[in-house]
Image (tube, rainbow, N blue to C red):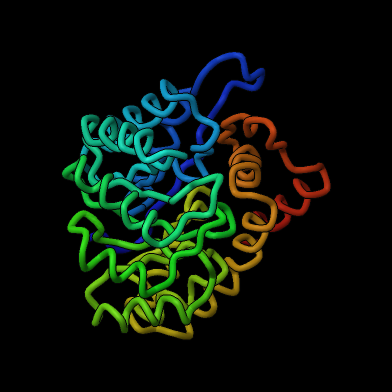
Amino acid sequence: MIEGIIAYPVTPFADDETTTVDTGKLAELVNRLVLTGAHAVAPSGSTGESAYLTEPEFDAVVETTIDVVAGRVPVIVGASELTTAATISRARRAERAGADAVMILPVSYWKLSEREIIEHYRSIGDAIELPIMVYNNPATSGIDMSPRLLVSMFETIPAVQMVKESTGDLARMSAIRDYSGGQLPYYNGSNPLVLDALSHGASGWCTAAHCLAPQLCLELYHAVRDGEIARAAATYATLRPLLEFIVAGGLPATVKAGLDLLGLGVGAPRRPLLPPTQDDISALKSILAGL
């Protein structure tokens, strides 16, 4: 079972967008995440602009990440696609590359019924031998999976073994815990909710903030695990402006801007995403300085 900080790297692109993934910069970033204490690394997630990657780019991101991590921590690959067949294709390639698990968000133009969601995950699970982290994020996918549905899939689909819950609703996490009798591991995907989520039993924190403030992220996690609530609250108070800023401004754009300010430039986000405005960059600079 994976516990702790699951770090989400951005995907570096060339500034002129005429070339593919900058695997050299990606390797540097992934190695930094591991060296600064991340308990797992999750490439090709929302932060990694997975929706904008071509299939060769997806393969390059996955293979580079797994090669650099080299077994030091688990690698959870975001393998979501619009169709079940395309998702299975990505999941199988992640498996061949050596991933430890895949994260699947149900992405669809049409709103999916519960029957369709269940069959989607069942088909993916039947096609691979890796565990699946079900990713619930209705703000980006437009599909909201209830705690009862998530627990039902955990109980009936062997591959479904984890949930990343990103609605920012603590009651949902409590429901997942209660409906599963504490058997289904769930991970906080809402950065501003992290203190409450960890305090109420989340197995870990899925976050891109580790790219910018790894020591504080680890400090918060360990303070909660050690039962030092005052220490955890103080750390969260320091981190909160950064967590709220990167979510409000869009994770790929704000995290890339933050890495640039830290001297670890990884290029701009891929259009239609745009870099932050100068005013936002100035605000981010002040937040980072305050850390």
Give the side of residue 111 with respect to residue 280, left or right: left
Please name the residue shown 35% across and 28% down the image.
64
Give the side of residue 266 with respect to residue 172, left or right: right
Q: Where does the image place residue 29, in percent across and percent down from the top left?
A: 45, 37
Please name the residue shown 24% across and 60% down the image.
161
Q: Where does the image place residue 136, in percent across and percent down from the top left?
A: 45, 60
Residue 110 or 47: which is nearer the viewer?
110
Please name the residue shown 43% across and 71% down the image.
146
Q: Where does the image place residue 74, in percent across and percent down from the top left?
A: 25, 48
Q: Residue furthest right?
A: 279
Query: In the rendered view, would you say 145 is above or below 94?
Result: below
Residue 286 or 120: which is nearer the viewer?
120
Which image quadrant: the C terminus?
A: bottom right
Q: Where does the image place residue 112, in percent across and percent down from the top left?
A: 47, 55
Query: In the rendered view, would you say 195 is above or below 2?
Result: below
Give the side of residue 98 with respect to residue 57, left or right: left
Number of on-image labels: 0
Residue 69 or 113: which is nearer the viewer?
113
Please identify the quarter of the rendering in which residue 23 is found.
top left
Please name the residue shown 73% across and 55% down the image.
286
Residue 170 or 289: which is nearer the viewer?
170
